[in-house]
Image: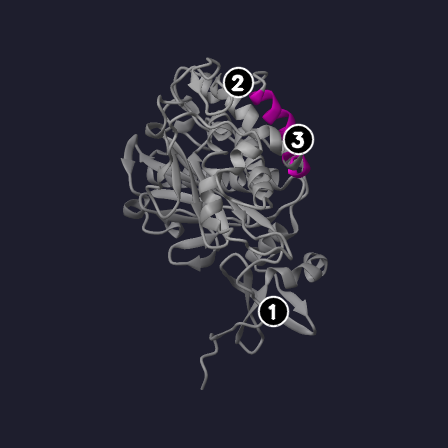
Amino acid sequence: MADPKKLEQASAAQALRLAAMGMEAECSLMLDDEPTRPEALFGSPRDFIRGELMHRQGTSYHLPTGGAVYFDTGVIEVATPVVEIERGCAARAGRSLWEALQFIRGELDAWDARNGRRTRLVGFSAHYNVSFELPPGEPANGRTIEQLARLLTYILPAPVMLLATNRRSTGVGVRPRKDRIEITSDFTPSPELMIATATLIVGIVRQVMTWPSYGLDELARHGIPVIGGFRPMPHTSRKGWLARFTCYPDNPFTCDIDRQMWPTERHGELSLRAIAARAVRPFWRPIGRISDPATFRLIGAVLRRRSPSLLELDDRPAAYEDVGKLCVWDGLAPPAQLARSRYERVVMRAVSGRHLRLDGRRLRPVGMSGWSGIVFEREDRRREVIAIDDLLAHLDDWERQ
């Protein structure tokens, strides 16, 4: 007899049909003010999270918020579901990420109360993912995702530094990941600044993707300043590039960001803020097209010195040390009022475990296949994977059911 749990890859494609983005955050764990590995303390997120959780893979589980939580080499990592790229997409992803962080913090609070201990989440890193594809109908002409990653390492660091990093930060990285570009930076203890960073990254990455070449000569053609002597290094984890502080003639994370101290190849001496502003200038409209109004104003305010950057503070803010308490998601902020994305709604419906009636069949969601497919169990106990894209047409009915 055939295994009833054998998956039938019915319609789940490996890639999403819509351009999409997502965010991840890594937090270190402190137990009674001592660093501890979550794997050693809990073994699995199931050991401190109450209630039913949909299993993803290994020790990874989906949360009721639609995101996922897992342990990764000594940190607790939270990932958002995929969000299709459209106006407000980064705000939707940011809300999903911070809702997941608040959920994890709440479950840790309950564990603390049961065990008479005290845990803290310390912000460690953030990853911003953007799907990659060449413009439809255009030949590659030598354009590869690896070349794109290298080119972005000359464009993104300065503006990302202003929006997302602090004086103890060490670098901004760009990693090619098969069908997506991943930007790595420090965790930012401000939901608004994290959403602003994601918005800027998505707008720039998606626009550079359309350039006819990914060669470094495009920097001069678009008027993007390059600090003299800057040479990115190989990324310290996985393939890719890293704009580490040692790649510059001085440390950009500890400098005065408004002092004209950086010699550039074509624009004379500029401040770090001016370099960031000039780097963003060619992408202002693409950023605006996918930004919510409040976030768009915040990006402009930081670049124009009307709103502070964390790099202007004397040290890293204390909010890093207690994520979910000293830095929290404000559900009243304007971006929080945006409706959820369609992809996000499909994932949340699946995670809820609610049955779907489809073509006269009653299907029960039991898992996910990556981020692109939902695993359903049929009434005959066989399993079927349906692509998220194919479920969009049934989303309204599923939610009504």
Callout 3: 10 Å neighbours few (<14), some, many (20+)? some
Q: Which residue is tagged 2?
A: 308
Eyeballing the image, is 311 above or below 279? above
Q: Which residue is tagged 3?
A: 334
Residue 356 at x, y percent in the picture: 64, 65
Q: Identify the residue at image location x=37%, y=50%.
A: 47
Residue 148 at x, y percent in the picture: 49, 45
Q: Earlier in the sequence, mark 2 or mark 1?
A: 2
Front residue of 260/47: it is 260
The type of residue carrying mark 3 is Pro
Task: Give the left or right position of residue 171, taking residue 369 as reference.
Answer: left
Callout 2: 10 Å neighbours few (<14), some, many (20+)? some
Task: Give the left or right position of residue 113, taking residue 142 as reference.
Answer: left
| Quadrant of the image occupied by residue 393 | bottom right
Look at the numbered disc 3 and give the secondary structure of its residue: helix
Q: Which residue is tagged 1?
A: 363
Front residue of 118/60: it is 60
Residues in magenta, as a range? 287-303
Eyeballing the image, is 318 above or below 389? above
Eyeballing the image, is 233 above or below 132? above
Look at the numbered disc 2 and give the secondary structure of its residue: loop
Asked if residue 154 lies in the magenta stretch, the reply is no
- Residue 391 visible in the current orientation: yes
**How many labels, in total?**
3
The type of residue carrying mark 2 is Pro
Q: Identify the residue at image location x=50%, y=62%.
A: 367
The type of residue carrying mark 1 is Leu
Q: Earlier in the sequence, mark 1 or mark 3?
A: 3
Q: CA distance from mark 2 to mark 1?
A: 51 Å
Front residue of 12/303: it is 303
Q: Quadrant of the N terminus?
A: bottom left
